[in-house]
Image (tube, helix red, strand yellow):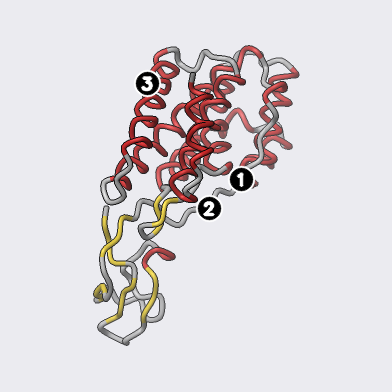
Amino acid sequence: MKVRGQRECQACGHRWSYYETGSVACPACESLRSVGVDDRHLHTDTPATLDLSPYRTAWADDELAGRVDDCKADLREYVRKRGFVDGGVLQPLDDAVLAAHELLQVMDLYGRARDPTDGEERYLLALLRGADDGERPPPEDVPPAWAEARGLAYANAVADYRRDVVEWLDDHPDREARRTLGTIHERVKRIQALQGDVSPTEAGSLVRATREVGEYLMEGAESSLASARERLR
């Protein structure tokens, strides 16, 4: 939605950035009586942090199986808040969002697994250790039985990014980018219909193509758009 980024408190006169706080409450006096003082801009992002330390502790204490639902709830809240347009400025599809989406899918599989293998548990632990910093295991480390987690996670993350970019394009028309995003949408729907059952390489290629469209729109690099189209073929 379009919001006014700069706000002024009518109680104490303090000014702050809504884009940074995500709240109309004054950070100085907590009054809710504030007004926007600049133009409206598309803004889809909300300040959000992801702290996985409680679940790393649960893993160390052999109690993670009982914390699966809590972890999934925290991950859902994080990806729900994250957007890709900040005060009218398009942002990239970042690693933190991808890792959070993937851990969400992996935790779901882990919660339903009766006897996960050592390789699957190592993969889950690697995500737990690094996802809140945007780190995730390389494609070759993905356990075959859990490849669908990465496929579905990446498709969902790309779908979220594409949605924001399409809205951003309403104010920054670009026919070629919109057409390429249509192809990306088709690939996303296919992977979602397969419940993520594609190779990690294919899922990674979709993410790279999506990022290249973003690079084209943010930096004007024609070569990035051409690369995205070639990758999608």
Left/right placement of residue 33 relative to residue 126 reads left
The answer to which quarter of the image holds residue 94 is top right
Q: Amino acid at mark 3?
A: Glu
Q: Are marks 1 and 3 in contact (CB under 8 Å)?
A: no
Q: Are marks 1 and 2 in contact (CB under 8 Å)?
A: yes
Neighbourhood count class around disc 1 (C-alpha, 10 Å): few under 14, some 14–19, many 20 upward:
many
Q: Where is mark 2, residue-wise? A: 49
Residue 217, given in percent of the width and then of the height, sits at 43, 46
Q: Are marks 2 and 3 in contact (CB under 8 Å)?
A: no
Q: Secondary structure at mark 1?
A: helix
Residue 208, given in percent of the width and then of the height, sits at 55, 32
Depth check: give the residue in front, 67 or 82: 82
Q: Where is mark 1, residue-wise? A: 132
Q: How far separated are the C-alphas under marks 1 and 3? A: 30 Å
Q: How far separated are the C-alphas under marks 1 and 2? A: 8 Å
For discs 2 and 3, the disc positioned in front in the rendered view: 3
Residue 31, given in percent of the width and then of the height, sits at 30, 77
Neighbourhood count class around disc 3 (C-alpha, 10 Å): few under 14, some 14–19, many 20 upward:
few
Left/right placement of residue 71 relative to residue 166 reads right
Mark 1 vs mark 2: which is more N-terminal?
A: 2
Q: Secondary structure at mark 2?
A: loop
Q: Secondary structure at mark 3?
A: helix
Q: Amino acid at mark 2?
A: Thr
Q: Amino acid at mark 1?
A: Asp
Instruction: Give the numbered dot on residue 186.
Output: 3
Which residue is located at x 54 percent, y 14 percent? 198
Instruction: Give the numbered dot on residue 103.
Output: none
